[in-house]
Image (tube, rainbow, N blue to C red):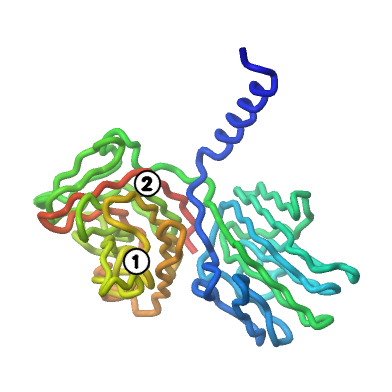
Amino acid sequence: MRTIAAILLSAITTTLSAANEDAGSWINLFDGETLYGWTTLGDVQWEVEEGAIVSAEGTGGLIATTSQFSNFELTLKLRLKARCSSGLVFRGTLGGHPTENGSSVLWLSEPRDSKSPWHEIAISARGAEVQVTIDGKPAEFTSGTNSVGHIALLFHHNNRAQVAIKDVQLRPLGLKPIFNGKDLDGWKAIPGKRSKFNVVDGAINITDGNGQIDTTGVYKNFLLQLDIISNGKHLNSGVFYRTPPGEFWMGYESQVRNQFIKDDRTQPYDFGTGGNYGNQNARKVVSNDHEWFTKTIVANGNHTAIWINGYQVSDFLDTRPVSPQGQGKAGYVNKAGTINLQGHDPTTDLSFKNILLQEYPDN
């Protein structure tokens, strides 16, 4: 017989599961070692010390993620020197003052007699529903009007200020499946090609090649998460996006190839898994063949970032002229297009599942 405590625990677990059923996988916005994926404004020097981003010399400025996010859970640890103040910006714009550009801001200050502890910050932002806590307690914040934007840390030069953050993690919310796990409804293979597409154990399995299978819908700005497995050694495939409908191997390609040179994962072969094919190598090959891995793609305007198993491997800002043909290797692709999965050659044998999307507004 179940106890009352067990029944209550089950009810709570069910409620939490239902509340988070559209949540994705966590990604790290800070790798604990470098400022990769971050950009700065102002004259402040930012450094990485003991696994934290720390402000050094300067009078004012901010450090912000190069990527923008819309609906998410964000957790991090923050420390302020006593008698100092700062601000944590989310859905922020890099131009102008946070109080005037539609950003949301959590203002922070540390008392005079504080021993500067690490504070636990948690933010849940789902549309206009935003909740913020500091050390588990609800906190007041300035609510902005932006639906998507950067995450940033402000620095103000007061009382020899110092501010630091670490363990910065984000999980997207409001994701919608674009593959139902049962059949290929919503997807269409490019005709006349060799690849074979089947649904096996809840995943799109691709064998042989060349070929591709496209979404019937088109998308421009979004966060995409999906799980991938390479069922052979060093197999070649890719996730394409902003592909002109009906066109073969166009748009941008996020490479899938778990291969690196001389046992050095920082030397990817053929751009490496998560690399922006033809434009930017992955900085590290994180994933392995014969193991499921999660790929996260954030494409917004002319910026794209990729995470593999939560680790950011590429960060590409496309400043080239527009490619009239929609070829991402040749220039900027500025129009909505399909998301598609590649069959590369006769050795192809890969599977894709849990394909989830969060659309951003067209900015």
Q: Residues within 10 Å of mark 1 (few under 14, many from 20)?
A: many
Identify the residue at image location x=51%, y=38%: 21
Q: Which mark is residue 355?
A: 2
Q: Is residue 189 above or below residue 69?
A: above
Q: Which residue lies at the image location 33% right of the left edge and 60% below the top edge?
A: 242
- Disc 1 residue type (three-letter): Val
Front position in the image: 7 or 277: 7
In the rendered image, the residue lying farthest to the right is 113
Closer to the chain start, of discs 1 and 2, is 1
With 263 as the anchor, is 30 left or right in this view? right
Report x, y in % for residue 277: 28, 69
Pick whichever, 56 or 240, lies toward us. 56
Closer to us: mark 1 or mark 2? 1
CB under 8 Å between callouts 1 and 2?
no
317 and 12: which is toward the camera: 12
202 lies left or right of 39: left
From the top left corner, tell me how far across and down residue 280 is, in percent: 34, 75
Q: Quadrant of residue 354?
A: top left
CA separation in Å, label 1 and label 2? 21 Å
**57 versus 151 height, above or below:** below
Q: Residue at x 40, y 42 (%)?
A: 177
Is 47 above or below relative to 21? below
Could you tell me which secondary element the residue under label 2 belongs to? strand
Q: Nearer the viewer, residue 206 or 251?
A: 206
Residue at horizontal 77 percent and vertical 82 percent from the top: 157
Residue behind mark 1: 285
Label disc, if present, on residue 28 of the rendered structure: none
Residue 194 in the image: state x and y as whole percent. Answer: 9, 51
Q: Give the SS element for disc 1.
A: loop
- Amino acid type, residue under disc 2 in the picture: Ile
Quadrant of the rendering where the N terminus is positioned: top right
